[in-house]
Amino acid sequence: MRRPSRRSLLRLGGVAVAGAAGVLVQAEAAHTPDDSFVRLRRRWRELIAGSGYDAAAEPYRTWLAALGRTAARHRDTMAPSRTSLWPDQAFPSFAATPRRLRAMAHAYVLEGTGLTGDAGLAAAVAAGVDHYRRHVYAAGADPAGNWWHWEIGVPKALLDAAVLIGPQLSERRSLALRDAVDHFVPERRLGGYSGTSTAANRVDLCMVMLLRAMLRADHGKAALAVSALSPVLRHVREGDGFYRDGSFLQHTYVPYQGGYGVSLLSGLATLFAVLRGSPWEVPGGRFLFDTVERSFAPFVRDGACMDLVRGRGVARRPFGDHDKGREIAAAILLLGDVAPETQRARWHAMVKGWARRDTARPMLEHAEPAFHARLAAIMDDAAVPAAPEPVGHRLLPMSARAVHRRPGWCAALSMASHRIGHYEHGNGENPRGWHTGSGMLYWWAEGHGDQYSDAFWPTVDPYRLPGTTVSARRLPDGAGEAWGDTRTPWRWVGGATDGTYAAVGQHLSGLESTLEAFKSWFFLDDAVVCLGAGITAEDRAAVETIVDNRRTDAPLTVEAGWAHLEGHGGYVVPAVGHGERGGVVGTFADQGLRTLRERRTGGGVARDYVTLWLDHGVDPRSAGYVYLLLPGASREETRARAADPGWVRVLANTARLQAVHVPSLGITAACFWNAGAAGGLSASAPCAVLVRERPDGPATLTVADPRCDLDELTVTWARPGGLLTGSAYTFRGLADQEGASETVGLR
């Protein structure tokens, strides 16, 4: 007999449910006077199954059949014993065993697996859940090891499986699972917003609480799951969560949109979708919707999530940045179902653009059915445009991150500060990410979508990350405190941006090193001007500034004052540098660019690298540097820029002030490490300043207080050739703006 089409099955809110789920809903409805939880469980199954696709059509047919084979194999090899549920997974098996049980439950619910509604499979899931509960997850057991397994990972998987098989889990087993979850995840865990109950962890705990509520139709637990979300859905000023500038932190010191942030966004999107129209509908939608474009989208380029917001996760597997970008896209599309139409339309266009441009790891080729169906519908809809990469500058001072986008290229900057760690290691992951906070400058031009994706982290020289200034002093694996507490003592980290251009600076201390440096980046139309000053160390080791380290075997051309890497871009490195030495400010002829081409191995693979760096010598005293990065530039364009020394004027490059003037753009910008003056600009206190003069519009002055401690700041701009010179502008209350920029029109 022909199986009914998906569209003929039970629907709720436009979502089709497989036959097994329909039977479960009918069975539950017959025994539940209040149907609120019947509808919640049905909605949960619908989200798992997805909608709008034909399970008999490709690629769904192949994916679902593979899931069915996997579930059958798990069912057939299950051999319960005192020490395991499967012989190859000895207890506690916190990850693999619960994951297998959940996969079996998914095969039971999803149509097209060959096991949809199979009573034997459901019975195996029920028996497996109870066996694991009795031998590992029993109420009263000692929660040894990582707390996360006991309170989030294990209960979420077991409860998911239990909810999916519904009445197939007996009353006795259901009550026993309830008691176990209540023991390890008591309601007090959702009390104070502190410790491990914050941000993404809080959302996961609320998800566990909601699944626990669905298991036993517990109204109180459902209400708690929703009310406990409120601290996540508002801005914080310290610790974990979202900041006004768009930053998202987890583990207190780590920018984490591409790790814990993905989990948070996905979890909240699921909770909003499941609870929509129920007695427990989640408030705070507007706040969450705003985070999509303020906190997540700035760090996704061509479908990949930038590594500078992925914490220790960068070391896990190749192309993890594309995997996380796909997860962000999936969460955004799911959240779009409950968002206002105007935001939903923008998100659809944005995600469609990401998917079209992600050729390194195409989204549709690596998507599970529910997301694949959503994305395919958008890709096939001619009425939905594919949004291009945006242009502009986003500076997030609370997380010491900056992203600069111009037509054809993008750059992103990672810095450590008094609030943000150099790097995160933990659980044995990312033990050599030491210098990612020492001013690592990522950049992409056309065709570079996999530059940092394809085995970059296991093969790159960890002492020579692009853009960084580092001591060559050898460090042990896992140097510094775990979980991101590798901060510097310096507060001046941040900058000023008018949304198009930016002046960004970092007062740097090396990780477990005496190195100190002052680094500035001026982000422009087709270049990043990079300055360094006051570079000092006493490590008895060489100190280097890494102009770049590209994973490529492309030809490199090096001429006096410039270099060009074919297919990538150019570098202008003047033969002389401007800076301070021995207390004397001046010009020093010692900027010898060094290069290296090598094949490096790590993680069982080998990759080619081209490295360019400046050697400051052993234990330098007040060394400095000047160079220009030209992403995507041709050899001719690079040569021409090197031949035009007046294109950018370095007004100052010392440990007190770094400033440049770019006549063609009408830009004068400075990082004032102390009060000072240069090129018509003066400031009464440490700050970042960007002046922009337009031939066809008003001039503007943008300032920021990266240290967040100024009650008052006076900036004076003596406009060259202007009718008025020495106009002073006073800014008050900058300390309360969390490093954000303020722009005014010039008189």
Image: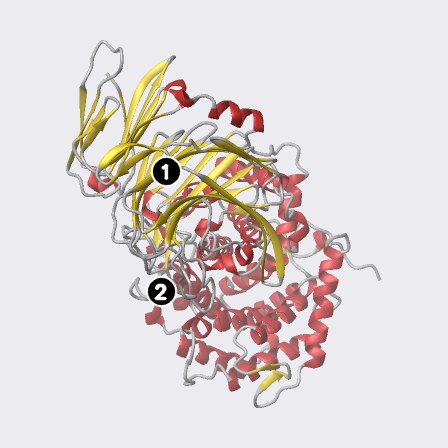
Whole-percent x, y for residue 626 in the image: 38, 35
Quadrant where the image shows the C terminus: top left
Front position in the image: 245 or 137: 245
Q: Which residue is mark 2?
A: 197
What residue sits 27% from the left and 52% below the top?
Answer: 418
State the quadrant of the N terminus: bottom right
Picture residue at 58% right of the left edge, 73% below the top: 96
Q: Is residue 91 above or below residue 158?
A: below
Disc 1 to disc 2, C-alpha distance: 45 Å
* 190 on left or right of 87: left
Q: Nearer the viewer, residue 214 or 537?
A: 537
Kind of residue at badge 2: Ser
Residue 32 visible: no
| Outermost residue to the bottom | 82
Element carrying mark 2: loop
Q: In what element is the residue under mark 1? A: strand
The answer to whether 71 is drawn above or below residue 605 in the figure is below
Q: Is residue 510 left or right of residue 582?
A: right
Q: Amino acid at mark 1?
A: Tyr
Q: Is residue 737 above or below residue 8?
A: above
Which residue position is annotated with label 1?
Answer: 625
